[in-house]
Image: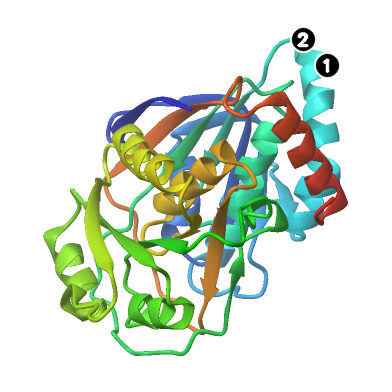
Amino acid sequence: MISHSSVYTFEDNKTHRFDVFINSIGYEERAAALVRAGRVSADCFISLSFEENEVLSFAENKKVMDRMSALIVTDVSDFFRTKFRSLIFEKYTIASRSLSVGIDVSSMNRTMSALALSTMFACKDYIGEFEILYVPAKFSEPTLTFTPIDQVGAVTPELSGFDSEPALPVALILGLGYEYGTAVGLINQLEPNFTLCLRATGGDEKYAEAVRAANLQFDFNPYNVEITEYELFDVKAAYEHIENIVYSLVTSYRVVLVPMGPKILAALLVLISLKYFGRVAVWRVARPGQAGQVIPEKAYMGAHVRTIDAISEKNTRLLREMLEMGQLS
């Protein structure tokens, strides 16, 4: 599914050229970092907007995207379910070729990322390949304060694992991030038969130490928990490592993926859930929190994703129908 991935720096003067580029407008400085730095060129810019939290860098990010004449999307679900396909078809008809699409997932929430990536595969007749871009955050010391979980559930109906066998035991694959005590709280709530925690490596060592502190020094007793690492700056290798794990579990467990931690992990888990469409679920964990500034790192990653043959024709049709209906068929 991921054909190759690369690491770039803002100093490379690399320009990523797309027919359509999708990002989000939020309060993080990194939300528009690629566009602000001139690293992206596109005929059409689409920005998914967090209008409920217009603080910190939101206004400046919106100015950057307004200068690009971006289409500002406030109802993300409605856009991807009812409008995106016709927009892409129109551009495909004019171009008379498969379109190139870029998706910057750096500041997207899990639902935005799931809808954007799912729609790429639903539109694979017009989009043969797309590139995921991710700008990591420069480390800042987190505030390790416990807050209760507001909501746990499928990130979208399409990625709910609707076709998994309910009699099978649950295997939880959980990303580890700054969310203090959330991992052990979720394990305690779900009581899975097996839990695998994913820990990012290759970034700032201070980040690794903060993740360990936020997750109780990885002491998950008395639960059956294992910890594995994935390489943050090698997206293709990270995808293959996690996908191999899911492959080994999916016939014996109901696999639930929970992407906490870096936003690129959320994108990878969505891709894996699409590969095992209907059999593997992606869940989001909602917790109250405060807006905090996120400064972009000097390096960022890109991963090229093939849509052709990644999902069967039957599952592609079902995915498209579910997106258009907004509910299970």
User: CB atoms at circles 1 and 2 under 8 Å apart?
Assistant: yes
Residue flagged by tag 2: what amino acid is it?
Ser
Q: Quarter of the image holding residue 76?
A: bottom right
Q: Can I make out residue 184 in this image?
A: yes
Residue 213: x and y in percent read 19, 78
Instruction: Identify the residue at horizontal 29%, vertical 29% (top origin).
Output: 12
Q: Quarter of the image holding residue 18?
A: top right
Q: Quarter of the image holding residue 227?
A: bottom left
Q: In the image, which disc is placed on residue 93?
A: 1
Q: Can I make out residue 68 in this image?
A: no
Q: Is 262 placed above or below 127 here? A: below
Residue flagged by tag 1: what amino acid is it?
Thr
Residue 311: x and y in percent read 62, 29
> Image check: 146 left or right of 99?
left
In this view, the residue in front, 95 or 183, is 183
In this view, the residue in front, 75 or 323, is 323
The local secondary structure at tag 1 comes to: helix
The local secondary structure at tag 2 comes to: loop
> Image check: 251 left or right of 199?
right
In this view, the residue in front, 20 or 254, is 254
Q: In the image, which disc is placed on residue 96?
A: 2
Instruction: Identify the residue at horizontal 55%, vertical 63% (top origin).
Output: 283
Residue 101: x and y in percent read 60, 29
Please count the marks in the image. Answer: 2
Residue 242: x and y in percent read 35, 44
